[in-house]
C-alpha cells in the first residue's frame, strides 16, 4: 500500500512564518507596537496578527483575511 501524501498546499509561505517569528520575538522583548496608537503589544494573538499583516504587505504567501460575521439586527 502506498503512503498517502497530504493533499494540502501550504497555507502560509516560509516568509510569512519568518515575519510572525520576528513579531513574536519583538513582543517578548517589549518593542512590538500596534498600529496608529503605538501601544506596546502584550497579546500573543495580536503579535501573530501583526506578523501576518506585515507579511501580507511584503507580498508573502498568506491567505486572505476572513470576512467579519454579520449580526442579525433585532
Image (cartoon, rainbow, N blue to C red):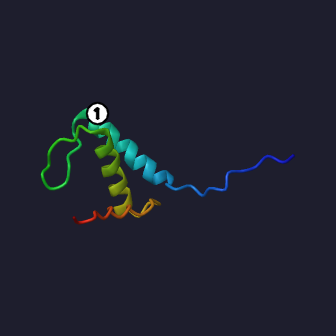
Q: Quadrant of the C terminus?
A: bottom left
Residue 64 image position (x, y, % from top left): 41, 64
Q: Quadrant of residue 24?
A: top left
Residue most toward the front?
Answer: 74
Residue 61 image position (x, y, % from top left): 47, 60
Residue nearest the viewer, comparing 73 with 17: 73
As displayed, is residue 28 above or below residue 7?
Answer: above
Residue most toward the top?
Answer: 28
Question: What's the residue at 45%, 48% (across, down)?
Answer: 17
As displayed, is residue 4 above or below residue 25?
Answer: below
Horizontal arrangement in the rendering, residue 15 relative to residue 49 (left or right): right
Question: What's the residue at 49%, 54% (across, down)?
Answer: 12
Residue nearest the viewer, comparing 43 with 24: 43
Task: Please give the count of numbered marks on the rendered protein.
Answer: 1
Horizontal arrangement in the rendering, residue 61 relative to residue 3 (left or right): left
Residue ID for mark 1: 28
As displayed, is residue 9 above or below residue 17?
Answer: below
Question: What's the residue at 52%, 56% (across, down)?
Answer: 11
Horizontal arrangement in the rendering, residue 49 relative to residue 59 (left or right): left
Horizontal arrangement in the rendering, residue 11 relative to residue 25 (left or right): right
Q: Quadrant of residue 28?
A: top left
Residue nearest the viewer, comparing 12 with 25: 12
Q: Secondary structure beneath disc 1?
A: helix
Residue most toward the left?
Answer: 37
Question: What's the residue at 33%, 37% (across, down)?
Answer: 25
Mark 1 nearby-residue class (10 Å; few <14, some 14–19, many ≥20): some
Amino acid at each position: 500500500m502506498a503512503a498517502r501524501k497530504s493533499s494540502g498546499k501550504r497555507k502560509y509561505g516560509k516568509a510569512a512564518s519568518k515575519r510572525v517569528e520576528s513579531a513574536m520575538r519583538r513582543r517578548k522583548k517589549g518593542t512590538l507596537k500596534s498600529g496608529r496608537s503605538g501601544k506596546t503589544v502584550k497579546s500573543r494573538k495580536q503579535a501573530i496578527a501583526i506578523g501576518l499583516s506585515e507579511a501580507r504587505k511584503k507580498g508573502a504567501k498568506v491567505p486572505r483575511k476572513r470576512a467579519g460575521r454579520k449580526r442579525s439586527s433585532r
